Image (cartoon, rainbow, N blue to C red):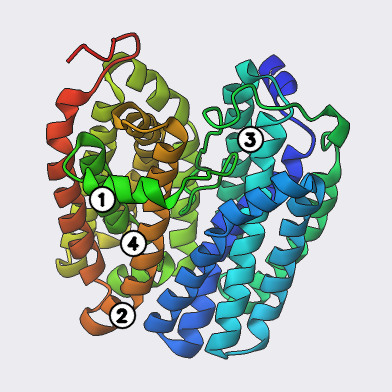
Amino acid sequence: MIQWKRYSERWYGGYAFQGAVVLGIVPILLPLVVDKAGGAAQAGIVVSAFYVGQLLAPLLGSFTDRSGLHKTVFLSGFIMLAVGLALFPATSSLPFWLALAVLQGAGSAASNTVSAMFIVEWKPKREWDQRVGWLQTFYGAGQAIGLGLAALLQMRPEFGLVFAALLMVPGFFLGRIGLPAASDRKVPETPELERRTHLAPRSPLPQTHHYERFMAKHVVRLVREAKTPFGKLILSWFLIQFGTWIIYNLYPLFMESAYSIGAGPSSACYAFAAFLGIFAYAPSGLLGKKIGDGKVVMLGTILTFVSQFGLGVLAYVDTGMNSWLAPLMFILQPVAWSPLIVAGTAFAAQLADMEEGPAVGLFNATTAIAAVLSAFAAGFLAEAFGYGSLPVIGTALVLAGGVVLFPLLREDRKQGDSPSDG
């Protein structure tokens, strides 16, 4: 309780409303609305457009840093989400849907980017981890509540999106309370190296807890050094993330088609898994310090593989118990996300031979690209081969990622080991 009071801010409450909408309601209801009118392929395209909007985070971060309009950009995210969600059910035009999905993603990116700036540019460095941890906890708690609401709203998904838009009103006003004054902003102690990124709980894309500016030269350097441990980690991470998000992107449609589990029960299952995942963040970090971050990433990969393999088998084998076995298999995946992202980010920084900022930026960009491409692919694969094909493909991709990752474990170091230690 004392930690909560010390390391959280009043505006975190408003930020939790975005967690409820962006990570809870939208992932369930958006594909339901699009699929009803345009089918699985269009649903995948629209979901990918939402992620494309989130890719604007670095530009929004750069604009905010240069203009100093931190409060304005942060609060504009609530407005963009409200407009994009409220207008979405008003049409069945794919171009209109795509524009609104990009607007929603940009709104999420705006608030997520600046939320972290409020920490790293206003608070002492020694408090960053605790404050970001509580920020993630609020966002993740919002997700769990949002998924529960989605379970209630899935019968009328169009109304649900309008309801989500209305949630941005209290989110906006709560988000204004206690925002730091511009006069209290401090200059980062080491501007380039101390700019970090984190991921919001189970978010499909990097929610930049300070924007990453890395030049094209770093991408070129990565291509040239593709056979280095860091280059292999990036390849492994792309395969694992592609395999993971191929399920998440059309989750309610997948559960309905493959296992005859409606959006209501499947949303409730996801809410429970998200709730469990919140408590896996801190243990994942502690475990990484004890056994090494690479081994924790492998643990998350194994859990994801088991989940995908189980879902793939159940998609084609009717055991008579699929209605509860499939949700049980799925729950492993959101829980596995915690060790994957906590240890994955640290392992990337450990293996890279470039500056930490660009290295973590490339790592997070890999997550973003995998999420966008898998959303686009999932819809077409579902229409061509059926939803049951998604976990089969996901299983193969996660397995391939694990195979690439395994040799890198010899590069793993526990906290306190020197770089020269094996």
Task: Kindly tell me whether residue 230 is visible in this rendering.
Answer: yes
The amino acid type found where label 1 is placed reads: Val
Give the CA separation, mark 3 to mark 1. 35 Å
Residue beneath label 1, please? 223
Judge the density around disc 2: few (<14), some (14-19), many (≥20) Cα neighbours within 10 Å.
Answer: some
Mark in the foreground, 1 or 4: 1
Residue that carries the numbered disc 4 in the rendered image: 247
- In-image side of 30 versus 366 (left or right): right
Q: Position of residue 59 (x, y in %)?
A: 61, 55
Do callouts 2 and 3 mark residues in contact (Cβ within 8 Å)?
no
Q: Which residue is denoted by mark 3 in the rendering?
A: 135
Mark 4 crowdedness (10 Å alpha carbons): few <14, some 14-19, many ≥20: many
Find residue 10 and report its horizontal and vertical position in percent.
80, 35
Tag of residue 213: none
The disc placed on residue 380 is: 2
Mark 1 vs mark 4: which is more N-terminal?
A: 1
Q: Position of residue 39 (x, y in %)?
A: 41, 86
Q: Quadrant of residue 161?
A: bottom right
User: Would residue 313 appear left or right of 241 to someone viewing this image?
Assistant: left
Q: Amino acid at mark 3?
A: Leu
Q: Is residue 150 visible?
A: no
48 on left or right of 132: left
Q: Residue at x 77, y 49 (%)?
A: 67
* Residue positioned 71% across, 15% down in the render: 2
